C-alpha cells in the first residue's frame, strides 16, 4: 500500500462514517437524560406531552448536526479536526508530533462496524484536547493508521506495514489465575450497589420481602453466620467478576512488533488496538503487586513519550508469569541485565528507615494500649491483634528493605522499590532530562536521599528511594555526563 | 560529594518571604480579635488559639524565611542549571541546558514592590522544572538573557 499523502483527492476534508448518524443521536440522548427527565416532569406538570417530544427531537437533531459539523483533514504536515455544533473548534496536530495511534470499539460501534481512532502526541491531552476520530469505518483504520504514523516513522523505503511482524506475547488462559487477586470485582460490586442506592432503591429495599427474609435468616442462624455467609458470597461474586472482566478485557491479547512499531491488541467485547512508535520507548516498568508476586506473576508497563504513564494507556502486559514479562521487556530494550540482573542494595541506613517507618504505628498503639490498660481495662483479644499487626508490619518492613535496589550504567538506570506495589523501573538514560535529590529532615539525619529522574516519558518521574546521598550523585553522574560536570 | 550551587538569592528574599508569610497569619489574628470582641465566653479557648497563632506566626515569619535563605542557592554552569531549595524538605535540582524548552519569569505583587523576580526553567518533563526564586530583577534578567542565548531551545528535547 502506498501512502497517498500527496494525492490531491485526499487533501480535502473528510466526514466521519455516515453510520455515525445512528450513533450520535443515541449518545446525545444518553448525555441529555437530565434534560429529558426535566421535560417529562414539565410535560406532566403542564399536561402537555409535547415538551418531551420537543426535547427529544431537539436532542436527535443536535446529534445529527454533530455529524455534519465534524470533519477531519490529513495535510502534509498536520492533521486537523473540526468539531462543534454551536461552538466551532479546530484542533490541529503536527504530524511529526504523533507518537502513537490507538483504536477502540465499544459494542455499539462494533455492531455498526465502526472504530474510534485516537492520535496521541507528546503533550498531555485529555477530554476536549484529545484528537479522536469518533468514529470511522473499521476497514478504513489500517489505511488511516499507516498514513498517520508514516510521518513519525519517516521510513523512505516504504510504509512500516511491509516489515515482518514478530509476536512477543499472546494471552494464555493460565494468566487468569492472577485475576481473582485484583480488587476490580469488588470495585464493580461496590459501584453497582452505589448506583442502586443512588436511584432510590434503598428505601424500597428496606421495606421489601428480601430485607425481611434477610432479617429472619439472621435471627434463625445468628448474626455471625449470616455476616460470614454474606462476606463469602461477596468475595465469591468478586472473584467471578474479576475473572470475567479480565477475560473480556485481555482474552485474545496479542503484543507484537515490527522494526519500528509496537502493536498491542486486546478485548473480546470492546476491542482496543494500540500502535506505539518504538523510537519513543524509554524503557519499561515491571510491576509486581504483592498478591500477584506471591503467585510468580508480574505486569509490564511501557515507559514511552506521548503515552500517559499510569493506568491502561501504558499497559503492555496484564498480570502474567514474571518470566514472560521479563522476556518481553528484554526483547523491547535489548538489555537482559537491566531487566533481571542483580541490583545494588541501599545499605543499612535505608533498611533501618524501612523498619522505623513500619513499626511506628504498632509501637504507638502499644503505648496507647498500655496507658489504657493501666488506667482501666482493655479487652483481652486486643493483645493478640496487636501482635498480629506487629508481625505483618515487620514482614512488610523486611520485604520493603529487600526490594530496595538500583543499578546504573551509561545507558540504563534501574530502580526497584516497594512491597505491596513493588515496581522495577528500567529507564534509558538518554531520556533523562533532569535530576532532583530530595531529602526530608529524617533523611538528612540518616544521610539518605531520594533521587528522582525526570523524563518526558511515562509517569515523568522515576524514583530511586533512600540511597545514600553520595551514591545518589554517583548515579546521576554515571547516567548523564552533564551531571558529572558539576562535581 | 557534589559541589553546592554558588549563588545565594537576593538579600531581600527573607524579608519578602516573611512579609508573604505574615499576611495570612495577620488575617487569622484579626479574625481571632473579632471573635474575642463578639464572644468572650471561653477565655481558655481564646488563649489557646492566640498562643497557637503566635507560635505558628513566629515559626513561619521569623524562622522559616531565614532557614530558607540559608538553604537556597543557584548556579548556571555551561551545561546545567542547578538549584538548592526548601527548608524542612530540601531539594537539589539539575536540568541540562541542552534540553531546556522554556525560560519564564514570574513576579508576584510583593516581588514587584521589592524588585525581585523568579525564573522557571522547564524541560519536556513535567517533573523536571527548575525554579530559581527571589532573584534581584537585574540578575533575573541576566539569567533569562543568558539562558535563552545559550540554550538551543527546542532543538533536542528528548520527547
Image: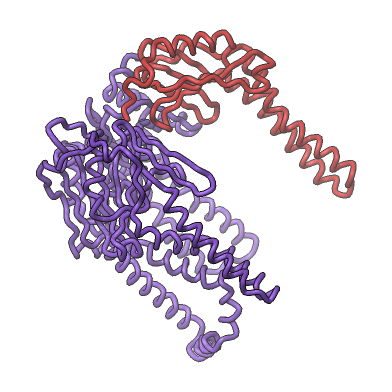
Q: How is the image coloured?
A: by chain
Q: Position of residue A208 (x, y in %)?
A: 56, 86
- Quarter-wise, where is residue B149 in the image? top left
> Could you say which is closer to the camera, residue A89 or residue A448?
A89
The colour applied to the residues of chain B in this rendering is red
Q: Is residue A351 visible?
A: yes
Q: Position of residue A264 (x, y in %)?
A: 23, 50
Q: Up-down: is B74 above or below B88?
A: above
State whether residue A339 is above or below residue B159: below
- Is residue A400 in view? no
Give whichever of B35, A446 is nearer the camera: B35
Q: Write down the quadrant of residue B16 in the picture.
A: top right
**Observer-nearest of A195 and A340:** A195
Residue A103 in the image: x percent, y percent? 30, 51
For the point 44% across and 78% down, the residue is: A230
Q: Is residue A469 left or right of residue A221?
A: left
Measuring from the top left, give residue B79's x and y in whole percent. 35, 14
Q: Residue furthest front?
A: A9
Which chain comes out purple in the rendered image? A
Q: Is residue A398 left or right of residue B138?
A: left
- Picture layout, residue A441 above or below residue A137: above
Task: Report the residue at 45% width, 62% height from top.
Answer: A25
Amino acid at each position: 500500500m502506498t501512502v497517498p499523502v500527496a494525492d490531491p483527492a485526499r487533501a480535502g476534508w473528510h466526514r466521519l462514517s455516515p453510520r455515525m448518524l445512528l450513533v450520535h443521536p443515541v449518545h446525545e440522548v444518553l448525555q441529555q437524560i437530565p434534560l429529558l427527565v426535566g421535560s417529562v416532569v414539565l410535560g406532566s406538570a403542564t399536561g402537555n406531552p409535547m415538551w418531551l417530544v420537543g426535547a427529544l427531537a431537539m436532542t436527535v437533531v443536535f446529534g445529527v448536526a454533530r455529524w455534519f459539523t465534524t470533519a477531519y483533514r490529513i495535510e502534509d504536515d498536520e492533521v486537523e479536526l473540526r468539531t462543534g455544533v454551536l461552538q466551532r473548534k479546530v484542533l490541529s496536530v503536527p504530524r511529526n508530533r504523533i507518537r502513537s495511534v490507538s483504536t477502540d470499539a465499544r459494542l455499539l460501534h462494533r455492531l455498526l462496524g465502526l472504530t474510534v481512532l485516537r492520535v496521541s502526541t507528546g503533550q498531555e491531552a485529555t477530554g476536549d484536547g484529545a484528537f479522536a476520530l469518533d468514529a470511522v469505518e473499521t476497514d478504513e483504520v489500517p489505511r488511516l493508521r499507516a498514513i498517520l504514523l508514516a510521518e513519525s516513522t519517516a521510513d523512505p523505503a516504504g510504509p512500516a506495514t511491509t516489515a515482518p511482524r514478530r509476536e512477543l506475547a499472546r494471552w494464555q488462559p493460565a494468566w487468569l489465575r492472577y485475576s481473582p487477586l485484583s480488587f476490580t470485582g469488588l470495585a464493580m460490586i461496590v459501584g453497582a450497589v452505589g448506583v442502586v442506592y443512588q436511584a432510590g432503591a434503598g428505601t424500597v429495599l428496606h421495606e421489601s420481602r428480601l430485607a425481611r427474609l434477610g432479617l429472619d435468616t439472621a435471627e434463625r442462624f445468628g448474626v455471625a453466620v449470616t455476616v460470614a455467609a454474606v462476606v463469602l458470597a461477596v468475595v465469591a461474586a468478586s472473584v467471578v467478576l474479576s475473572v470475567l472482566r479480565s477475560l473480556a478485557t485481555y482474552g485474545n491479547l496479542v503484543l507484537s512488533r515490527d522494526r519500528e512499531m509496537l502493536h498491542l491488541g486486546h478485548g473480546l467485547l470492546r476491542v482496543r488496538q494500540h500502535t506505539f512508535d518504538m523510537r519513543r520507548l524509554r524503557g519499561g516498568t515491571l510491576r509486581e503487586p504483592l498478591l500477584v508476586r506471591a503467585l510468580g506473576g508480574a505486569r509490564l508497563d511501557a515507559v514511552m513519550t506521548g503515552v500517559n504513564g499510569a493506568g491502561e494507556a501504558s499497559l503492555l502486559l496484564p498480570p502474567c508469569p514474571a518470566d514472560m514479562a521479563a522476556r518481553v521487556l528484554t526483547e523491547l530494550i535489548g538489555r537482559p541485565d537491566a531487566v533481571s540482573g542483580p541490583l545494588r542494595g541501599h545499605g543499612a541506613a535505608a533498611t533501618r528507615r524501612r523498619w522505623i517507618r513500619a513499626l511506628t504505628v504498632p509501637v504507638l498503639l502499644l503505648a496507647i494500649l498500655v496507658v489504657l490498660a493501666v488506667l482501666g481495662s482493655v479487652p483481652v483479644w486486643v493483645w493478640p491483634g496487636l501482635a498480629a499487626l506487629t508481625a505483618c508490619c515487620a514482614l512488610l518492613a523486611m520485604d520493603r528493605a529487600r526490594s530496595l535496589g538500583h543499578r546504573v550504567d551509561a545507558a540504563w538506570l534501574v530502580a526497584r522499590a516497594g512491597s505491596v506495589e513493588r515496581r522495577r523501573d528500567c529507564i534509558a538514560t538518554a531520556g533523562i532530562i533532569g535530576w532532583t535529590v530530595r531529602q526530608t529532615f529524617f533523611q538528612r539525619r540518616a544521610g539518605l536521599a531520594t533521587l528522582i529522574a525526570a523524563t518526558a516519558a511515562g509517569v515523568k518521574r522515576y524514583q530511586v528511594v533512600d540511597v545514600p546521598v553520595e551514591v545518589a550523585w554517583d548515579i546521576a553522574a554515571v547516567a548523564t555526563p552533564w551531571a558529572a560536570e558539576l562535581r | 560529594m557534589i559541589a553546592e550551587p554558588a549563588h545565594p538569592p537576593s538579600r531581600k528574599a527573607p524579608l519578602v518571604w516573611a512579609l508573604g508569610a505574615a499576611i495570612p497569619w495577620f488575617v487569622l489574628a484579626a479574625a481571632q480579635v473579632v471573635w474575642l470582641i463578639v464572644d468572650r465566653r471561653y477565655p481558655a479557648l481564646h488563649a489557646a488559639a492566640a498562643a497557637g497563632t503566635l507560635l505558628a506566626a513566629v515559626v513561619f515569619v521569623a524562622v522559616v524565611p531565614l532557614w530558607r535563605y540559608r538553604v537556597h542557592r543557584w548556579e548556571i554552569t555551561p551545561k546545567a542549571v542547578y538549584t538548592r531549595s526548601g527548608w524542612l524538605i530540601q531539594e537539589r535540582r539539575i536540568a541540562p541546558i541542552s534540553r531546556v524548552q522554556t525560560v519564564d519569569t514570574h513576579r508576584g505583587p510583593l516581588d514587584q514592590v521589592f524588585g525581585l523576580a523568579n525564573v522557571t526553567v522547564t524541560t519536556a518533563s513535567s517533573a523536571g522544572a527548575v525554579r530559581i526564586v527571589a532573584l534581584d530583577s537585574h540578575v533575573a534578567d541576566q539569567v533569562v538573557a543568558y539562558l535563552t542565548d545559550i540554550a538551543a531551545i527546542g532543538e533536542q528535547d528528548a520527547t
